[in-house]
Amino acid sequence: MNNDWGLPDWRDSFSYGDTTRWKLLRWRWEFYRRRDDLRQLFQSKIKTLCQNTDGTHTAVSDLRDNLLRSPFDPGFLVDCSEAEKLEFGYAGIPNPRISDQEMGAIFSLHDAVTIESEKSFANSKGLGTNRPLSGGKMHITFDIDRPIDPQLKAANRALKKHQVAHHGKNFQRRRHPKKWLGYLQTLDAREAKVTWSEIAKIHAHTKGDEQAARDIWEQANILRFDF
């Protein structure tokens, strides 16, 4: 294991644990915790925290669940500015040395959906009412007294229509989860300054081709910054 950032042994896929049980949030965190900028942000912020007499620190997580934790505990978060939240997608940054974080700590704000109560739409006309907003946002009103599935389908059509109108196309993200473990191994190997020829051995289909190994690293690196 890489003792600096808690990384598994890139040569042994089993050292990563049972990745078949990982949820999407965990996969995102595994890629993001390998980012130098996220690591540096966490390090810079824990230096400014006030240490308590019992060795714990005050952080965002303390305000959320009224518990005092050490920066080396799962679920501990350092506070973020609005710009940092936008950049990383987290309300607070967990310790990137810890792989198995609490799900609440690694929930992505990028996947969050804003839900407003009926009072917020007191003057709306009900189902089908949609309001394009600035910044590429859009409000769609749902009626909880009617079947949900037809409304979701109608909302899907409306969102796609407005996305085309706004951007000229619909965006689709193609995910390849079967490749993700190999991507993590590739990132960790490269961080350990392993040669491209050695990295190619992780991926049997490359047949030792160094350029193929570089191409795989490029794909893995994209996920570090845009999962």
Image: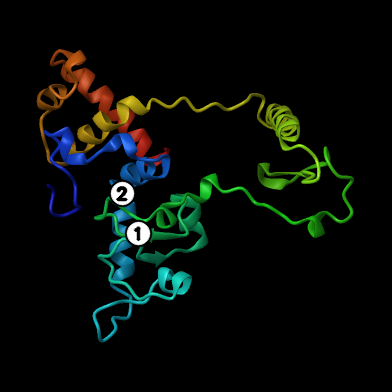
Using a 10 Å C-alpha cutoff, classify the residue at mark 2 as few (fewer than 14 neighbours), some (14 to 19) or many (20 or more): many
**What number is the disc on residue 205?**
none
- Rendered location of residue 143, percent (x, y): 80, 44
Q: Amino acid at mark 1?
A: Pro
- Rendered location of residue 165, percent (x, y): 73, 28
Report if the CB atoms under discs 1 and 2 are less than 8 Å apart: yes
**What number is the disc on residue 33?**
2
**Image-based side of 52 in relation to 225, left or right:** left
Position above or below: 206 against 98: above
**What number is the disc on residue 94?**
1
Q: Quadrant of residue 207?
A: top left
**Image-based side of 121 in relation to 199, left or right:** right
**Image-based side of 60 in relation to 140, left or right:** left
Q: Nearer the viewer, residue 189 or 75?
A: 75
Q: Secondary structure at mark 1?
A: strand
Q: Amino acid at mark 2?
A: Arg
Q: Nearer the viewer, residue 69 or 200?
A: 69
Q: Name which residue lies at 65% across and 51% down.
A: 114
Q: Quadrant of residue 201?
A: top left
Question: How many numbered dots are placed on residues in this image?
Answer: 2
Q: Secondary structure at mark 2?
A: loop
- Rendered location of residue 121, percent (x, y): 82, 54
Q: Name which residue lies at 73% across and 37% down.
A: 148
The answer to whether residue 189 is seen in the rendering is: no
Q: Name which residue lies at 41% across and 73% down.
A: 62
Specify the color scheme: rainbow
